[in-house]
Amino acid sequence: MGKRKKSWQEKLLDSKDLPRVEKIPEKRSKKWGRGTVVIPAPIEVNEIMSKVPKGKLITINDIRKKLAQKHGATVA
């Protein structure tokens, strides 16, 4: 018997150790700048997307800004 695959809902609710705010690694600092980066939990991203009214648009950059502000990080 094989292991049962997780459903989308189970994956969404499995936060592991997220959200996590970390210092931006030196390799990434050229692209992202200096400061901190937030790695969000999947449920946080889903909450932001679910608040977008039907027929409206939110960009990934808008989502990243909201997450960074929420966690006091430089980028997300």
Image (spheres, rainbow, N blue to C red):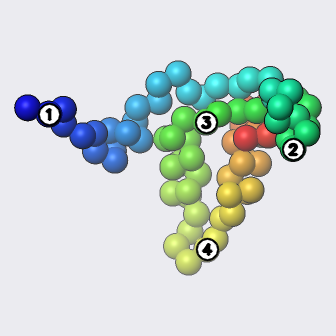
Q: Are marks 3 and 2 in contact (CB under 8 Å)?
A: no
Asked where in the image residue 72 lies, by quadrant, the reply is top right
- Whether tag 1 and tag 2 are in contact, CB under 8 A, the answer is no
Q: Earlier in the sequence, mark 3 or mark 2?
A: 2
Measured Cα–Cα span from mark 4 to mark 2: 30 Å
For label 3, the residue is: 40
Q: Earlier in the sequence, mark 1 or mark 2?
A: 1
Displayed quadrant of residue 20: top right
Residue 65, above or below 15: below
Counting residues from the N terminus, which is met first, the one under dot 1 or under dot 3?
Answer: 1
| Residue in view at x 74 percent, y 23 percent | 22
Looking at the image, is 75 positioned above or below residue 57?
A: above
Label whose residue precedes the other's in the sequence (4 or 3): 3
- Residue 2: mark in rendering: 1
> Which one is nearer the viewer's eye here, 6 or 40?
6
Mark 1, secondary structure of its residue: loop
In the picture, which quadrant includes the N terminus? top left
Q: Residue at x 53, y 48 (%)?
A: 47
Foreground disc of the pair 4, 3: 3
Q: Local crowd at mark 3 within 10 Å, few (<14), some, or many (≥20)?
A: some
* Label disc, if present, on residue 31 of the rendered structure: 2
